């Protein structure tokens, strides 16, 4: 409950300050233009974030950057729906890619400080994944080269003949 009251006080103070500086009409125009611009940006950035997530999944990458961007775009869209000047500004900042990248880096750093295994997972996710099996002890190795016995099979329609 105290946060709601604080939010209301901050929004009222911001609107009164802006209204007394530039006038009531201009303040309403700023709110309208900010909302329209924010809705357009939210749609555009939301589609771009969804495409980036799909591309990362298709490429079999860990999509932590894409998912964080999608989360921040969604939060920006929610803030735009909440009435008020301060929330509109905060929502627009979350929708702009440069400020979103700054916020994303801070969020990732804070999450990695709370859970250090996230940093390890992020670092390891950059390299290629090689499927394999770990053997205990020394493998049986001989000095002779490895020879694979077998024959080649012709596949119908194969161009390499």
Image (cartoon, grey):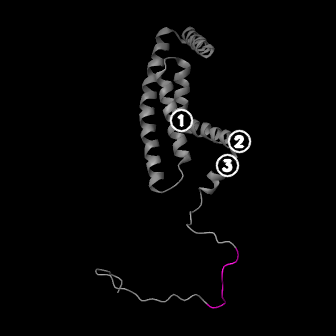
Return the x and y of residue 142 as percentages of the image width and height: 66, 88
- Using the image, determine if residue 57 lies above or below residue 70: below
Pointers 2 and 1 in contact (C-beta within 8 Å): no
Q: Nearer the viewer, mark 1 or mark 3?
A: 3
Query: How far across and down, in percent of the image, does residue 42 sit?
Result: 45, 32
Callout 3 secondary element: helix
Q: Which residue is mark 3?
A: 117
Q: Quadrant of the N terminus?
A: top right
Q: Earlier in the sequence, mark 2 or mark 1?
A: 1
Stretch of the chain drawn in magenta: 137-144
Query: Residue 122: which numbered mark, if any?
Result: none
Q: Residue furthest bottom?
A: 144
Percent coordinates x, y for residue 123 in the rendering: 64, 54
Q: In front here: 103 or 16?
A: 103
As drawn, the label of residue 113 is 2
Left/right placement of residue 132 relative to residue 52 reads: right
Q: Nearer the viewer, residue 116 or 9?
A: 116
| Mark 2 vs mark 1, CA separation in Å | 20 Å
Q: Which element type, helix, strand or loop, lies under badge 2? A: helix
């Amino acid at each position: 409950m105290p946060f709601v009251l604080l939010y209301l006080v901050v929004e009222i103070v911001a609107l009164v300050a802006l209204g007394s500086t530039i006038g009531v009409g201009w303040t309403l125009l700023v709110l309208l233009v900010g909302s329209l611009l924010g809705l357009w940006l939210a749609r555009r950035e939301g589609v771009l974030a969804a495409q980036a997530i799909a591309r990362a999944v298709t490429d079999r990458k860990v999509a932590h950057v894409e998912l964080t961007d999608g989360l921040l775009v969604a939060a920006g869209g929610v803030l735009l729906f909440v009435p008020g000047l301060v929330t509109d500004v905060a929502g627009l900042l979350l929708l702009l890619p440069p400020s979103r990248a700054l916020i994303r880096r801070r969020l990732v750093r804070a999450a990695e400080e709370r859970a250090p295994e996230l940093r390890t997972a992020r670092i390891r996710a950059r390299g290629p994944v090689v499927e394999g099996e770990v053997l205990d002890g020394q493998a049986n190795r001989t000095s002779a080269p490895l020879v694979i016995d077998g024959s080649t099979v012709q596949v119908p329609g194969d161009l390499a003949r």
